[in-house]
Image (cartoon, grey):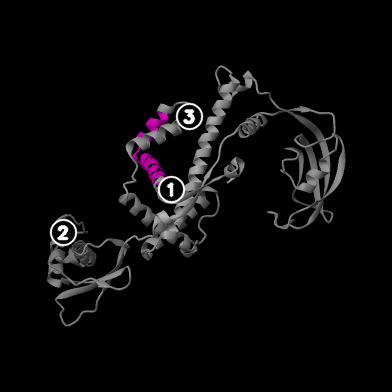
Amino acid sequence: MNSTIGSVETVSALERRISLAIPADAIASEVNVRLQKLSRKVKMAGFRPGKVPLKMVAQAHGYEVESEVVSDAINEALREAVTKNELRVAGRPRIEQKAAGEDAKVLSFEATFEVYPEVKHSDISALTIEKVTAVVGEAELDKTIGILLKQRVKYVAADRAAQNDDRLTIDFLGKIDGVAFAGGSASDYAFVLGQKQMLADFEAGLLGMKAGETKAVDVKFPEDYHGKDVAGKTAVFELTLKKVEAPILPELTEAFAKELGIVDGDVQKLRADVKENLERELKGRLTQRNKQAVLDALLTTAQFEVPKALVEMEAQSMVERARADMKARVMKDDMPIPADVFQPQAEKRTKLGLMVADLVKQHKLEAKPDQVKAMIEEQARSYDAPDEVLRWYYADPRRLDDVKAVVMEDNLMNWVLGQAKVSEKTVDFDELMAR
């Protein structure tokens, strides 16, 4: 539309402003063209399609069409200005119409927007990053197999006093100041003693009791107990022990190995299989922890501002994810969540995103097809039908993109660790896996 575009004005480090002047007659001409096109298909009572007078079409749709034409003209002029000045716009420009001056033949606007920063960071080789390592030893392997055995525990009736790890069946009635309270009673309630399924005083009272015995026990509720009506109070529970069952653990035998999918029942194959799974999970935990250490270190080198528009968009995205998470947990998801709660985290994530994108592009750290395939094949090995897993990933570009993102992050981590000073630290397997 032969718009006049002013020079780019620097408002702040990242904010820019451009003046746009659009000929009023060009707007009017384009509005007329679009109204004529619209009149050929618009429907209006009393007229056949295509026969509605242009004046009536203009009365009904003129404002909407004019707004559309002006918006298109502004966007076209802005695109031209951005391209001409080689600007990378961050977020959506803010458009304001200027008051009509002496020249009523033009519509004047100001477009204010932010641009992407030049990503700058200090020397990565000067960083010192702690890289953690851990191994799966025989102790870790034995402990995991012990857990597998416990998961298949059986219980048999025991004519003796209750002890930890027994399964007890009880009746109980709790009262506070002589009055029963909601949730304080049950019949034929079964649980395993010593696994902290019940309050400590409650379990301590049952320890040493025999089937058929009844006992009154004082039970102190913690101050932060989830039931506010009883939190911090002391209740008297009448406990009746009805059944004591002792645990019988299966032995690590051929039959047990077969139960866990080892066709020939070879116990050594079972141990090798469990160890492989542990090492795969351990590798994932180590990668995640070292990756976070790399990202935290990279943030300390950042020497640039981030566009407020991008931070606001990230904060809003975090709000939406929080709402989705609340909904998934069957929680009330319509409560107000102010975006500024996420502002510091959003700024950090935005800055990291810009740094990562710059380093990946600069050092060609994008995921290679063979890397993507190798990662999928590694994940597929833990399934019964690896080929089907492979086909599942390659059937959807979005699934592949998720894998590519992980590979790219791994490439970045390895590159940074190759540049920085690295101090290795061996961590305890259980401590790492508990995180």
Residue that badge 1 annotates? 417
Residue that badge 3 annotates? 383
| Front in this rendered view, residue 309 or 138 | 138
1 or 2: mark nearer the eye: 1
Mark carried by residue 39? 2
Mark 1 element type: helix
Position of 95 with respect to 182 (left or right) is: left
Residue 134 lies in magenta, yes or no? no
Among the two numbered marks 2 and 3 on one chain, the one whose residue lies closer to the N terminus: 2
Residue at horizontal 44 percent and vertical 31 percent from the top: 380
| Circle 2 residues within 10 Å: few <14, some 14–19, many ≥20 | many
Residue at horizontal 84 percent and vertical 47 percent from the top: 217
Report whether residue 35 is seen. yes
Mark 2 element type: helix
Depicted 369 relative to depicted 348: above or below: above
Mark 3 element type: loop
Labelled pair 2, 3 in contact (Cβ < 8 Å): no
Residue 393 lies in magenta, yes or no? yes
Tell me the amino acid under the disc marked 2: Ser
Q: Which residues are magenta?
A: 388-411
- Magenta stretch: dominant secondary structure: helix
Report whether residue 324 is seen. no
- Percent from the top left, x then y, of residue 184? 76, 48
Q: CA distance from mark 1 to mark 2?
A: 66 Å
1 or 3: mark nearer the eye: 1
Tell me the amino acid under the disc marked 1: Leu
Position of 211 with respect to 121 (left or right) is: right
